Image: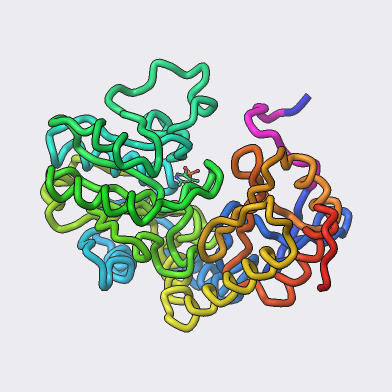
Amino acid sequence: MSFLFNNYSRRQIHIVSGKGTIVQDDKGKEYLDFISGIAVNSLGHAHPAIVETIKYQSEKLWHVSNLFESPEQEKLAEKLAKDTQFAHAFFCNSGAEANEAAIKLARKHTGKHVIITFEQSFHGRTFGAMSATGQEKIKQGFGPMLESFRTVPFNNPAALEAAISDDVAAIMLEVIQGEGGVHEVTAEFADAITNICKSKGILCIVDEVQTGIGRTGTRYAYEQTSLMPDIMTLAKGLGGGFPIGAMLGTSDLFEAFGPGSHGTTFGGNPLAVSVAQTVVNHIFDNSFLEEVQHKSDYLKGKLLEILPTTYEVRGKGLLIGIDCKEDVTLFIRQAEAAGLLVVQAGPSVIRLLPPLTVTEDEINHAIGLLASVLHIPSTL
Ligand SMILES: *Cc1c(COP(=O)(O)O)cnc(C)c1O
Protein backbone atom coordinates (compact mmCIF):
# COMPACT_ATOMS: atom_id res chain seq x y z
CA MET A 1 0.00 0.00 0.00
CA SER A 2 1.13 3.51 -0.80
CA PHE A 3 0.09 6.81 0.70
CA LEU A 4 0.06 8.17 -2.85
CA PHE A 5 -2.60 7.85 -5.53
CA ASN A 6 -1.62 5.42 -8.21
CA ASN A 7 -1.94 7.87 -11.14
CA TYR A 8 1.67 7.49 -12.30
CA SER A 9 3.34 4.29 -13.44
CA ARG A 10 6.53 5.00 -11.57
CA ARG A 11 9.88 3.37 -12.33
CA GLN A 12 11.50 1.56 -9.44
CA ILE A 13 14.38 4.00 -8.99
CA HIS A 14 14.76 6.61 -6.29
CA ILE A 15 16.89 9.43 -7.68
CA VAL A 16 18.50 11.38 -4.85
CA SER A 17 20.94 13.78 -6.50
CA GLY A 18 22.06 15.21 -9.81
CA LYS A 19 24.80 17.30 -11.36
CA GLY A 20 24.71 18.36 -15.01
CA THR A 21 23.56 15.37 -17.09
CA ILE A 22 24.29 12.76 -14.38
CA VAL A 23 21.86 11.66 -11.67
CA GLN A 24 22.46 9.21 -8.85
CA ASP A 25 20.02 6.85 -7.14
CA ASP A 26 19.85 5.89 -3.46
CA LYS A 27 22.12 2.89 -4.11
CA GLY A 28 24.83 5.08 -5.59
CA LYS A 29 24.19 3.98 -9.18
CA GLU A 30 24.73 6.71 -11.76
CA TYR A 31 22.60 7.35 -14.83
CA LEU A 32 22.97 9.58 -17.87
CA ASP A 33 19.80 11.64 -17.71
CA PHE A 34 18.42 11.93 -21.25
CA ILE A 35 14.95 12.76 -19.88
CA SER A 36 15.90 15.83 -17.83
CA GLY A 37 12.57 15.92 -16.05
CA ILE A 38 10.80 15.67 -19.45
CA ALA A 39 12.52 18.68 -21.01
CA VAL A 40 12.55 20.62 -17.73
CA ASN A 41 16.17 20.64 -16.48
CA SER A 42 17.31 22.61 -19.52
CA LEU A 43 20.60 23.67 -17.88
CA GLY A 44 21.14 20.26 -16.29
CA HIS A 45 20.91 19.42 -12.60
CA ALA A 46 22.15 21.86 -9.95
CA HIS A 47 23.49 24.42 -12.42
CA PRO A 48 25.67 26.80 -10.34
CA ALA A 49 23.96 29.93 -11.73
CA ILE A 50 20.51 28.61 -10.73
CA VAL A 51 21.77 27.56 -7.30
CA GLU A 52 23.19 31.06 -6.85
CA THR A 53 19.95 32.74 -7.98
CA ILE A 54 17.82 30.66 -5.61
CA LYS A 55 20.15 31.37 -2.70
CA TYR A 56 20.17 35.09 -3.40
CA GLN A 57 16.45 35.51 -4.06
CA SER A 58 15.36 33.22 -1.22
CA GLU A 59 17.01 35.56 1.24
CA LYS A 60 15.37 38.61 -0.36
CA LEU A 61 11.76 37.78 -1.26
CA TRP A 62 9.97 34.55 -2.26
CA HIS A 63 6.40 35.43 -2.80
CA VAL A 64 4.41 38.59 -3.10
CA SER A 65 0.83 38.72 -4.35
CA ASN A 66 -0.09 39.87 -7.84
CA LEU A 67 -2.00 42.59 -5.97
CA PHE A 68 1.32 44.45 -6.20
CA GLU A 69 3.54 45.68 -9.02
CA SER A 70 6.12 43.28 -10.35
CA PRO A 71 9.17 44.79 -12.03
CA GLU A 72 10.66 41.26 -11.99
CA GLN A 73 7.81 39.91 -14.16
CA GLU A 74 8.12 42.97 -16.44
CA LYS A 75 11.78 42.21 -17.01
CA LEU A 76 11.22 38.52 -17.77
CA ALA A 77 8.28 39.32 -20.09
CA GLU A 78 10.43 41.81 -21.98
CA LYS A 79 13.20 39.23 -22.45
CA LEU A 80 10.78 36.56 -23.67
CA ALA A 81 9.06 38.91 -26.11
CA LYS A 82 12.17 40.65 -27.43
CA ASP A 83 12.36 40.53 -31.26
CA THR A 84 9.08 38.63 -31.54
CA GLN A 85 5.53 39.68 -32.43
CA PHE A 86 4.52 39.21 -28.79
CA ALA A 87 3.99 42.25 -26.59
CA HIS A 88 2.60 40.96 -23.28
CA ALA A 89 2.98 38.01 -20.93
CA PHE A 90 0.97 36.33 -18.19
CA PHE A 91 2.84 34.12 -15.72
CA CYS A 92 1.48 30.95 -14.11
CA ASN A 93 2.86 27.69 -12.71
CA SER A 94 2.59 24.97 -15.35
CA GLY A 95 2.00 24.11 -18.98
CA ALA A 96 -1.64 23.22 -18.49
CA GLU A 97 -2.26 26.55 -16.75
CA ALA A 98 -0.55 28.43 -19.58
CA ASN A 99 -2.82 26.64 -22.06
CA GLU A 100 -5.92 27.41 -19.97
CA ALA A 101 -4.96 31.07 -20.14
CA ALA A 102 -4.47 30.81 -23.91
CA ILE A 103 -7.88 29.18 -24.41
CA LYS A 104 -9.61 31.79 -22.25
CA LEU A 105 -7.83 34.69 -23.96
CA ALA A 106 -8.66 33.39 -27.45
CA ARG A 107 -12.35 32.98 -26.56
CA LYS A 108 -12.63 36.34 -24.87
CA HIS A 109 -10.83 38.29 -27.58
CA THR A 110 -12.70 36.75 -30.52
CA GLY A 111 -16.08 36.25 -28.84
CA LYS A 112 -16.04 32.81 -30.51
CA HIS A 113 -15.72 29.43 -28.86
CA VAL A 114 -14.42 26.73 -31.22
CA ILE A 115 -10.74 25.83 -30.97
CA ILE A 116 -9.24 23.46 -33.50
CA THR A 117 -6.58 21.10 -32.16
CA PHE A 118 -4.88 18.02 -33.61
CA GLU A 119 -4.79 14.25 -33.30
CA GLN A 120 -1.95 12.93 -31.05
CA SER A 121 -1.56 16.38 -29.51
CA PHE A 122 -0.95 16.88 -25.80
CA HIS A 123 -1.87 20.09 -24.02
CA GLY A 124 -2.18 19.08 -20.35
CA ARG A 125 -4.48 17.49 -17.78
CA THR A 126 -6.79 20.28 -16.60
CA PHE A 127 -10.27 20.37 -18.14
CA GLY A 128 -9.61 22.88 -20.92
CA ALA A 129 -6.18 21.50 -21.75
CA MET A 130 -7.43 17.90 -21.57
CA SER A 131 -10.38 18.71 -23.84
CA ALA A 132 -7.92 20.28 -26.28
CA THR A 133 -5.74 17.16 -26.24
CA GLY A 134 -6.13 14.87 -29.26
CA GLN A 135 -5.59 11.54 -27.46
CA GLU A 136 -8.52 9.42 -26.24
CA LYS A 137 -6.49 7.67 -23.53
CA ILE A 138 -5.96 10.99 -21.73
CA LYS A 139 -9.73 11.65 -21.58
CA GLN A 140 -10.98 8.17 -20.71
CA GLY A 141 -13.48 8.14 -17.87
CA PHE A 142 -13.48 11.91 -17.37
CA GLY A 143 -16.23 12.85 -19.83
CA PRO A 144 -18.07 14.83 -20.91
CA MET A 145 -15.26 17.03 -22.18
CA LEU A 146 -15.47 20.79 -22.45
CA GLU A 147 -17.46 21.65 -25.57
CA SER A 148 -16.19 23.24 -28.75
CA PHE A 149 -12.82 21.59 -29.32
CA ARG A 150 -12.56 20.20 -32.82
CA THR A 151 -9.84 17.55 -33.31
CA VAL A 152 -8.41 17.33 -36.82
CA PRO A 153 -5.67 15.06 -38.32
CA PHE A 154 -2.21 16.68 -38.00
CA ASN A 155 -0.33 17.79 -41.12
CA ASN A 156 -3.43 17.43 -43.29
CA PRO A 157 -4.27 20.82 -44.91
CA ALA A 158 -7.49 19.54 -46.57
CA ALA A 159 -8.88 18.21 -43.28
CA LEU A 160 -8.04 21.50 -41.57
CA GLU A 161 -9.69 23.51 -44.34
CA ALA A 162 -12.82 21.37 -43.98
CA ALA A 163 -12.99 22.00 -40.23
CA ILE A 164 -13.06 25.80 -40.53
CA SER A 165 -16.35 27.55 -39.79
CA ASP A 166 -17.44 31.03 -38.70
CA ASP A 167 -17.34 30.14 -34.99
CA VAL A 168 -13.64 29.20 -34.90
CA ALA A 169 -11.66 31.33 -32.46
CA ALA A 170 -8.26 29.68 -32.80
CA ILE A 171 -6.10 26.90 -34.18
CA MET A 172 -3.86 25.46 -31.47
CA LEU A 173 -0.86 23.23 -32.14
CA GLU A 174 2.49 21.95 -30.96
CA VAL A 175 5.24 22.80 -33.46
CA ILE A 176 6.64 19.36 -32.69
CA GLN A 177 4.20 16.98 -31.00
CA GLY A 178 6.27 15.79 -28.04
CA GLU A 179 4.18 13.34 -26.02
CA GLY A 180 2.37 12.19 -29.17
CA GLY A 181 5.47 10.66 -30.80
CA VAL A 182 7.80 13.51 -31.89
CA HIS A 183 5.91 14.57 -35.01
CA GLU A 184 7.06 17.84 -36.58
CA VAL A 185 4.66 20.21 -38.30
CA THR A 186 5.40 20.09 -42.06
CA ALA A 187 6.30 23.27 -43.97
CA GLU A 188 3.19 22.81 -46.10
CA PHE A 189 0.94 22.53 -43.04
CA ALA A 190 2.51 25.53 -41.32
CA ASP A 191 1.86 27.56 -44.51
CA ALA A 192 -1.75 26.34 -44.58
CA ILE A 193 -2.33 27.33 -40.93
CA THR A 194 -0.77 30.74 -41.46
CA ASN A 195 -2.88 31.40 -44.58
CA ILE A 196 -6.13 30.26 -42.97
CA CYS A 197 -5.50 32.31 -39.83
CA LYS A 198 -4.69 35.41 -41.85
CA SER A 199 -7.56 35.17 -44.32
CA LYS A 200 -10.23 34.16 -41.75
CA GLY A 201 -9.12 36.28 -38.77
CA ILE A 202 -8.51 33.13 -36.69
CA LEU A 203 -5.92 33.20 -33.91
CA CYS A 204 -2.91 30.89 -34.01
CA ILE A 205 -1.85 29.44 -30.65
CA VAL A 206 1.44 27.55 -30.42
CA ASP A 207 1.91 25.31 -27.41
CA GLU A 208 5.67 25.54 -26.89
CA VAL A 209 5.54 24.06 -23.39
CA GLN A 210 7.96 21.32 -24.50
CA THR A 211 9.61 22.89 -27.57
CA GLY A 212 10.25 26.40 -26.20
CA ILE A 213 13.27 28.02 -24.50
CA GLY A 214 15.98 26.64 -26.75
CA ARG A 215 14.92 22.99 -26.76
CA THR A 216 14.83 22.83 -30.57
CA GLY A 217 17.95 24.95 -31.14
CA THR A 218 16.16 28.30 -31.48
CA ARG A 219 14.49 30.31 -28.70
CA TYR A 220 11.11 29.03 -29.86
CA ALA A 221 10.41 26.23 -32.33
CA TYR A 222 7.91 28.28 -34.39
CA GLU A 223 10.83 30.52 -35.43
CA GLN A 224 11.96 27.68 -37.71
CA THR A 225 8.56 27.63 -39.48
CA SER A 226 6.27 30.04 -41.33
CA LEU A 227 3.87 30.10 -38.34
CA MET A 228 3.02 33.57 -37.02
CA PRO A 229 1.39 32.78 -33.67
CA ASP A 230 -0.78 35.32 -31.87
CA ILE A 231 -0.41 33.38 -28.61
CA MET A 232 2.40 31.16 -27.32
CA THR A 233 2.54 29.06 -24.17
CA LEU A 234 5.69 28.07 -22.28
CA ALA A 235 6.53 26.07 -19.15
CA LYS A 236 8.79 22.99 -18.86
CA GLY A 237 12.25 24.36 -19.69
CA LEU A 238 11.48 27.94 -18.63
CA GLY A 239 12.34 27.45 -14.95
CA GLY A 240 15.10 24.87 -15.47
CA GLY A 241 13.38 22.76 -12.77
CA PHE A 242 11.57 25.47 -10.83
CA PRO A 243 7.83 25.47 -11.62
CA ILE A 244 6.78 28.37 -13.84
CA GLY A 245 4.59 28.74 -16.93
CA ALA A 246 3.91 31.66 -19.23
CA MET A 247 1.50 32.77 -21.92
CA LEU A 248 2.59 35.43 -24.39
CA GLY A 249 0.29 37.35 -26.71
CA THR A 250 0.33 40.13 -29.28
CA SER A 251 -0.69 43.70 -28.48
CA ASP A 252 -4.08 43.15 -30.21
CA LEU A 253 -5.04 40.85 -27.34
CA PHE A 254 -4.18 43.26 -24.53
CA GLU A 255 -7.72 44.53 -23.89
CA ALA A 256 -9.25 41.06 -23.51
CA PHE A 257 -7.25 40.35 -20.34
CA GLY A 258 -8.24 43.45 -18.38
CA PRO A 259 -8.15 43.79 -14.57
CA GLY A 260 -9.96 40.91 -12.84
CA SER A 261 -10.37 38.82 -16.02
CA HIS A 262 -7.85 36.11 -15.10
CA GLY A 263 -5.34 35.36 -12.38
CA THR A 264 -3.41 33.00 -10.14
CA THR A 265 -2.06 33.22 -6.61
CA PHE A 266 1.42 31.80 -7.15
CA GLY A 267 1.96 32.77 -10.81
CA GLY A 268 5.15 34.68 -11.46
CA ASN A 269 6.32 35.02 -7.89
CA PRO A 270 9.76 36.66 -7.49
CA LEU A 271 11.56 33.37 -6.74
CA ALA A 272 10.21 31.61 -9.85
CA VAL A 273 10.73 34.65 -12.05
CA SER A 274 14.30 35.21 -10.88
CA VAL A 275 15.19 31.59 -11.71
CA ALA A 276 13.52 31.86 -15.13
CA GLN A 277 15.53 35.02 -15.82
CA THR A 278 18.76 33.17 -15.10
CA VAL A 279 17.67 30.31 -17.39
CA VAL A 280 16.66 32.65 -20.20
CA ASN A 281 19.86 34.74 -19.85
CA HIS A 282 21.90 31.58 -20.42
CA ILE A 283 19.86 30.08 -23.25
CA PHE A 284 18.90 33.20 -25.25
CA ASP A 285 22.46 33.64 -26.36
CA ASN A 286 23.38 33.01 -29.99
CA SER A 287 26.45 30.94 -29.22
CA PHE A 288 24.53 28.78 -26.70
CA LEU A 289 21.76 28.15 -29.24
CA GLU A 290 24.28 27.40 -31.99
CA GLU A 291 25.87 24.86 -29.65
CA VAL A 292 22.48 23.18 -29.17
CA GLN A 293 22.08 22.94 -32.96
CA HIS A 294 25.59 21.61 -33.31
CA LYS A 295 24.98 18.93 -30.64
CA SER A 296 21.70 18.08 -32.32
CA ASP A 297 23.40 17.53 -35.69
CA TYR A 298 26.05 15.43 -33.99
CA LEU A 299 23.52 13.29 -32.08
CA LYS A 300 21.27 12.81 -35.11
CA GLY A 301 24.25 12.04 -37.33
CA LYS A 302 25.49 9.35 -34.94
CA LEU A 303 22.01 7.84 -34.67
CA LEU A 304 21.63 7.68 -38.45
CA GLU A 305 25.09 6.10 -38.65
CA ILE A 306 24.33 3.25 -36.26
CA LEU A 307 20.61 2.63 -36.70
CA PRO A 308 19.26 0.25 -39.34
CA THR A 309 17.23 2.04 -42.01
CA THR A 310 14.02 0.54 -40.61
CA TYR A 311 14.31 3.06 -37.76
CA GLU A 312 13.25 6.66 -38.24
CA VAL A 313 14.89 9.61 -36.45
CA ARG A 314 12.67 12.69 -36.00
CA GLY A 315 12.72 15.99 -34.12
CA LYS A 316 14.79 19.14 -33.85
CA GLY A 317 17.44 20.40 -31.49
CA LEU A 318 17.60 18.18 -28.43
CA LEU A 319 14.05 16.89 -28.76
CA ILE A 320 14.76 13.74 -30.73
CA GLY A 321 12.54 10.73 -31.35
CA ILE A 322 13.77 7.34 -32.52
CA ASP A 323 10.82 5.52 -34.08
CA CYS A 324 11.69 1.83 -33.72
CA LYS A 325 8.44 0.71 -35.41
CA GLU A 326 7.83 -1.72 -32.56
CA ASP A 327 6.96 -1.46 -28.87
CA VAL A 328 9.91 0.15 -27.06
CA THR A 329 8.84 -0.52 -23.43
CA LEU A 330 11.49 -3.22 -23.01
CA PHE A 331 14.29 -1.15 -24.63
CA ILE A 332 13.57 1.68 -22.23
CA ARG A 333 13.85 -0.65 -19.23
CA GLN A 334 17.08 -2.16 -20.58
CA ALA A 335 18.56 1.30 -21.21
CA GLU A 336 17.78 2.19 -17.63
CA ALA A 337 19.52 -0.94 -16.36
CA ALA A 338 22.52 -0.02 -18.51
CA GLY A 339 22.57 3.50 -16.99
CA LEU A 340 20.70 5.62 -19.53
CA LEU A 341 17.40 7.32 -18.77
CA VAL A 342 15.14 7.89 -21.79
CA VAL A 343 11.38 8.27 -22.09
CA GLN A 344 8.76 6.91 -24.45
CA ALA A 345 6.66 9.06 -26.82
CA GLY A 346 3.85 6.96 -28.22
CA PRO A 347 4.24 3.17 -28.27
CA SER A 348 7.15 2.87 -30.71
CA VAL A 349 9.25 5.99 -30.10
CA ILE A 350 12.24 6.44 -27.78
CA ARG A 351 12.47 10.14 -26.92
CA LEU A 352 15.81 11.76 -26.13
CA LEU A 353 15.64 15.00 -24.10
CA PRO A 354 19.10 15.60 -22.63
CA PRO A 355 19.83 18.88 -20.84
CA LEU A 356 20.80 21.56 -23.39
CA THR A 357 24.17 21.61 -21.62
CA VAL A 358 24.92 17.95 -22.51
CA THR A 359 28.49 17.35 -23.72
CA GLU A 360 29.69 15.51 -26.81
CA ASP A 361 31.30 12.86 -24.57
CA GLU A 362 27.97 12.28 -22.86
CA ILE A 363 26.25 11.99 -26.24
CA ASN A 364 28.86 9.40 -27.31
CA HIS A 365 28.32 7.49 -24.09
CA ALA A 366 24.54 7.52 -24.56
CA ILE A 367 24.83 6.35 -28.18
CA GLY A 368 27.01 3.44 -27.07
CA LEU A 369 24.47 2.42 -24.43
CA LEU A 370 21.56 2.73 -26.87
CA ALA A 371 23.41 0.63 -29.43
CA SER A 372 24.05 -2.12 -26.89
CA VAL A 373 20.40 -2.14 -25.81
CA LEU A 374 19.14 -2.19 -29.41
CA HIS A 375 21.78 -4.86 -30.22
CA ILE A 376 23.39 -2.71 -32.89
CA PRO A 377 27.17 -2.69 -33.34
CA SER A 378 28.61 0.73 -32.54
CA THR A 379 32.15 1.87 -33.25
CA LEU A 380 32.06 4.36 -30.36
C1 LIG B 1 4.00 18.79 -20.71
C2 LIG B 1 3.15 19.51 -21.68
C3 LIG B 1 2.00 20.21 -21.25
C4 LIG B 1 1.51 20.18 -19.83
O1 LIG B 1 2.37 20.82 -18.95
P1 LIG B 1 2.17 20.61 -17.36
O2 LIG B 1 3.21 21.51 -16.77
O3 LIG B 1 2.38 19.16 -17.07
O4 LIG B 1 0.79 21.05 -17.04
C5 LIG B 1 1.30 20.92 -22.20
N1 LIG B 1 1.68 20.94 -23.48
C6 LIG B 1 2.77 20.28 -23.94
C7 LIG B 1 3.16 20.39 -25.36
C8 LIG B 1 3.53 19.54 -23.04
O5 LIG B 1 4.60 18.86 -23.49
Q: Position of residue 289 (x, y in %)?
A: 47, 76
Quarter of the figure with the N terminus: top right
Residue occupying the point 67% across, 42% down: 325
Residue 155, image quadrant: top left
Q: Is residue 311 above or below residue 77?
A: above
Quarter of the figure with the C terminus: bottom right
Q: Is residue 90 visible?
A: no
Task: State which region is magenta.
Answer: 3-13
Q: Is residue 154 above or below residue 148?
A: below
Residue occupying the point 38% across, 21% down: 145
Residue 11, magenta (yes or no): yes
Q: Position of residue 360 (x, y in %)?
A: 69, 77
Q: Position of residue 112 (x, y in %)?
A: 15, 32
State the residue in front, 44 or 330. 330
Residue 55, image quadrant: bottom right
Residue 351, magenta (yes or no): no
- Residue 25 is left or right of residue 180, and the answer is right
